[in-house]
Amino acid sequence: MPQTPMTIAVDGPSGSGKSSVSRAVARELGLGYLDTGAMYRALAWWCLDQGVDLSDEAAVAQAAADLPLTISTDPDAPHVRVGDVDVTDAIREDRITGQVSAVATNLDVRAELRRRQRLIIEEQRGTTGGVVAEGRDLTTVVAPDAELRVLLTASEEARLARRATERHGAADAVTLAATRDLVLRRDREDSTVSTFLEATDGVVTVDTSALTFEEVVAALLALARGEVRPDAAAGTPHTP
Ligand SMILES: Nc1ncnc2c1ncn2[C@@H]1O[C@H](COP(=O)(O)OP(=O)(O)OP(=O)(O)O)[C@@H](O)[C@H]1O
Ligand SMILES: Nc1ccn([C@H]2C[C@H](O)[C@@H](COP(=O)(O)O)O2)c(=O)n1
């Protein structure tokens, strides 16, 4: 546990490696891990389960206010529950991935989930000593005062290949085409309400396109431990 509380905020587009890298960094530093995308996914799941029309903005905002969500911050045992239902796996299904942006672009929903995210971050700072929190608006809106803010990027090609390999075991013409919509359309829609394609002032950009997973984790750990000076200039790429 760090001597002074530490929040590491990580943003980036789909497939840049936010979830997997943030979880590994949290584990290594003994911090909590907060997957904010899972909160938007859980709300989408609940709306569909309750028969709420995702295009009815007022109804979806009300669902966000009522959402009986429990999310684990243990990087070794991530789980998400809505009421008594464990939705950890269900929220990763394509039907949720394909529709979650409708929920995530609702501004009332964002206000409510950000409120909950800030509470979790504060709670983690007082218990485990901090948290690695990842999503699309952590560095800019949810935790702009985080001790370390990182934007993970990767080329479109690299991101599609990673997701295709994860979903289908290979990145060929067919699997890349099947993955394209779930990655690129979603980023297009999500970027209408958040800034995660370019770094804002003071956010360190790590381009992961040509880095292995282990190299990206090592780069973030070096930044967190102060072994590498985060260049305060906006969007300065970091090369480990
Ligand atoms: N540097 C890397 N090189 C190769 N594969 C990677 C790298 N980083 C992550 N991956 C793999 O890429 C896939 C996507 O990573 P991850 O789920 O962490 O991305 P993400 O940014 O959280 O995406 P999303 O926002 O869609 O949830 C995973 O299968 C992960 O293991
Ligand atoms: N802070 C966040 C986190 C996530 N979202 C949106 C973007 C995605 O479409 C969806 C699920 O995120 P993922 O699990 O794929 O990272 O939630 C957001 O708008 N803001």
Image (spheres, grey):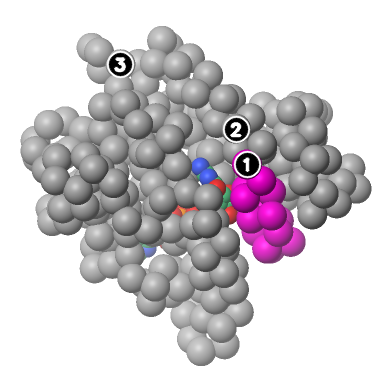
Q: Which residue is mark 1?
A: 107
Quote the CA–CA distance across marks 3 and 2: 25 Å
Q: Is residue 235 above or below residue 8?
A: below
Residues marked 1 and 2 touching at CB (< 8 Å): yes
Give the label on residue 111, or none: 2
- Ranked by sequence position, the earlier of labels 3 and 1 is 3
Q: Residues within 10 Å of mark 3 (few under 14, many from 20)?
A: some
Amino acid residing under circle 1: Leu
Amino acid residing under circle 3: Pro
Secondary structure beneath disc 3?
Answer: loop
Q: Start and end of the magenta stretch?
A: 91-107
Q: Position of residue 24 (x, y in %)?
A: 36, 41
Residue at 56% in and 44% down: 37
Position of 234 with respect to 29 (left or right) is left
Quote the CA–CA distance across marks 3 and 1: 30 Å
Position of 141 with respect to 151 (left or right) is right
Position of 94 with respect to 156 (left or right) is right
Tell me if residue 114 is in the magenta stretch: no
Secondary structure beneath disc 2?
Answer: helix
Figure quadrant of the N terminus: top left
Q: Is residue 48 above or below residue 232?
A: below
Residue at 53% in and 50% down: 193
Quote the CA–CA distance across marks 1 and 2: 6 Å
Q: Which residue is mark 3?
A: 5
Q: Residues within 10 Å of mark 1 (few under 14, many from 20)?
A: few
Residue nearer the viewer, 22 or 97: 97
Residues marked 3 and 2 touching at CB (< 8 Å): no
Residue nearer the viewer, 55 or 24: 55
